[in-house]
Image (cartoon, coloured by chain):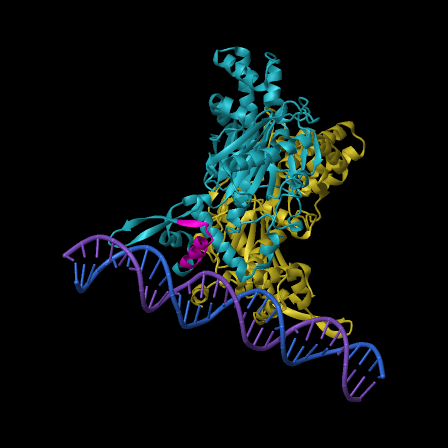
Chain colours: A cyan, B yellow, C blue, D purple
Amino acid sequence: MVERSKQTVRDLRRGNRSVLLRHLYFEGRLSRHELGRDTGLSGGTISNVVGELIADGLVEEAGSVDSDGGRPRVLLQVAADRGFLIGVDVGETQVRVALFDLALTELAASDHPLSDHGHDVGHVVQLILDGLAEVLDSTGTDRDRVLGVGIGVPGIVEQGDPAADPTDPGGIGAVVHGQTIDWDAVPLGRLLRAGTDLPLHIDNGAKTLGQAEMWFGAGRGAGNAVVALFGSGVGACVIANGVPYRGATSSAGEWGHTKVHVGGRLCRCGSRGCLEAYVGAEALVERWGEASDSSEKAGLAALLAAAEADDPVADALLCETAEYLGASIADLINLFNPERIVIGGWAGLLLGPRLLPAIRAAARSYALRFPCEQTSIELGLLGPDAVTVGAATLPLARFLDSGGDVPEPGRREARALR
Amino acid sequence: MVERSKQTVRDLRRGNRSVLLRHLYFEGRLSRHELGRDTGLSGGTISNVVGELIADGLVEEAGSVDSDGGRPRVLLQVAADRGFLIGVDVGETQVRVALFDLALTELAASDHPLSDHGHDVGHVVQLILDGLAEVLDSTGTDRDRVLGVGIGVPGIVEQGDPAADPTDPGGIGAVVHGQTIDWDAVPLGRLLRAGTDLPLHIDNGAKTLGQAEMWFGAGRGAGNAVVALFGSGVGACVIANGVPYRGATSSAGEWGHTKVHVGGRLCRCGSRGCLEAYVGAEALVERWGEASDSSEKAGLAALLAAAEADDPVADALLCETAEYLGASIADLINLFNPERIVIGGWAGLLLGPRLLPAIRAAARSYALRFPCEQTSIELGLLGPDAVTVGAATLPLARFLDSGGDVPEPGRREARALR
DNA sequence: CAAGTTAAATCACGGCCTGAAGTAAGCCTC
DNA sequence: GAGGCTTACTTCAGGCCGTGATTTAACTTG
């Protein structure tokens, strides 16, 4: 039941502002004329809305271009310095905080390793807050000009009720369930709110990276896609009709624990036969047996090197991995019927070049013919560092959706009265 | 990228009409006052829009009720006889056509067995057209008052480009790929259009039945759910945010061919290890070995009877079936994070009462704890005949979405000029 | 320098929702 | 049983919105 809610003329304007701003953001440098042609809005409205956007400082003129024999077109673009975005990656080994302008150019970053205290919640919160202060102070950025902070964490993020505080969607109420880092119902939003007034957006790191691939990487242009993330664990970000699909409580996309052999190998989740137990980097390194003392990354690199050197055991293991990945990707194809499957994650990017042909072949043989023909399987383009960029897209998405409504921390009452 | 498109004040009114009509349809018999309270629209607008809806004959007054000490509330309801809907079920063994009023009360039905000609396309088309004529003529229903014909077919339905004919969404351009009935890219919409002017809506039968369960059955009230259909084959209808999820080319939800054992039993789809090869009714009957001469339905009933009579072989087979179903439902839970899983289909309803506890236990043991706790697993309430009701919901959904815009066959030009 | 051409701004118009003021229709009390 | 009270609904002015025709701006060409 799509209980669409009522609308008023104000929503209409906000929607059309959003359409224009969004188009300008992604297509960049267009004239008012072209904007009208692309969006279907009349010239009058374009002039009117663009005038508003320029007055608000969200859009600026950017030169002009001849139009054979007539008045030149004035090009428009989103003002990159109108606001700033912060992306935070709470990863397995470090906390990374990066400051971006609206064009997602990285202006500053701060990395803090996590080795000593593990994922103790208080410590992580402190690192995040320290990181925020660092990137803001080092660049002299005014806190009022930060549109929001996006935070990607490993684990399921249950979003808070947006009705509780509409000016801060998904922030303060977010609760994190991170099995692998021993976070059980951690109210991360509330904890961070105690240390900062900036608008917060918390989400699962896989969804974050997936969104980055969709906006700027291998998923660009697809409306329905699955970004499969292959690292120590295995996850996925499902994009349905252009937005990450969350499900009832935001835990959709837990691909790593779908079954490839009912009753098979024991998985770290406690169940048996999970995909992750066969092809997760941790499982692979363990199964290969060697170099178990060094890091997972080094172990996997060694496995790959051995296979490249024609070690038959390593080769067989990688072939099997491709078979399982392909079969499980076939499940994704059958269930989601995506236009595209993007394989990302550090392990995916490491093994991808070697495994991709075998994965494609396995997927083709296990999936139904019709949906398989509609899908292409690609490697991700962005690398695992893109989690921070993806995190920054969370407040950016809100900014674009709202048509450029800028949340101003500490001045919420003033805005409400306006 | 959610490229929302521009809106004009007209869209606004249509949207609000739709909100009201929809609310009235599902909640029924409300006063203007309550309507305002529920939807958030102001009293002025309610009066205005309801007046319009009454003038259009879409809504009627239905008595009044005291309001302690004040003017009584006038109750409103959707006028059930304002329009008619037709649902068509192209099943494995028959073509069923049923005529409904807007309240989905069945007014007439026509059944034609398919035994002799199989699924020859021309024959099926003729049966559908005959069925339409029968139900309309037997009730003396004016064709102009039929809002649309929904058709559920076994197979993947690729929807046509709605831009091609906006007055007839999903109808004329629909192409059916039905592996099990040997339909390869059948342009069913075009073929039917040659024989009738009624607005057509063609979709997969599983999606159709799923929508019926969501609107009127065990899925009622859930926004994210999966209706698992367990018959000769195995399928699913995924409901995301209240609407059936289609994917890129409408083939999403092919659950029956996800893997439970990579490289396992051969499936009729040609691949190995599919769920359907283990628990589909056809597979079950074949594996049980007995009574293979009679129908699938009788075979499955015999299997169940044997298990009830403590036949150890039958019991073991059913236990294994529950294990596989549960494990595969766990995959659905992990991937889709639904509020509810509904098990339907004739085999599901037949075996469900006996298997449900075991299925629930298996799902719990194979799924991740968090999403599993958010989900309930229920049996469907509607029975397989509900495919026709579900099919009729296709034009009904269009009717409600459009705010009661009535397509008038043969008078399209007139409407366009208005 | 005038005519032609294309881009953008302006403005009257009809449509929309809101919210306040007005009206209808029943009850209660004196 | 008459006036007052309560609640439901209707009407209407006011402020926005997008459209599309008209006007103004800016540059090229002959």
Q: Residue at x 76, y 72 (%)?
A: B66
**Position in image of residue A116 (x %, y %):** 65, 22
Q: Nearer the viewer, residue B94 or B80?
A: B80
Which SS type dominates the magenta stretch?
A: helix
Is-magenta flag for residue B24? no
Would residue A56 be counted in the magenta stretch? yes
Would residue B140 be found to the left or right of residue D21 on screen?
right
Instruction: State the residue in front, A26 or A83.
Output: A83
Front in this rendered view, residue A19 or B202: A19
Look at the image and give the residue range highlighted in magenta.
A46-60
Is A57 in front, or is B188? A57
Please say whether residue A4 is visible from this viewpoint.
no
| Above or below: residue A181 compared with residue A287 | below
Q: Quadrant of the C terminus of chain A?
A: bottom right
From where the camera sits, is residue A20 visible? Answer: yes
Vertically, is D8 above or below B213? below
Q: Residue B143 at x, y = what percent?
A: 53, 64
Q: Is residue B297 left or right of residue A376?
A: right
Residue A6 percent location from the top left of the image:
59, 59
**Image x and y of residue A333, in percent:** 54, 35
Is C3 displayed left or right of A260 in the figure?
Answer: left
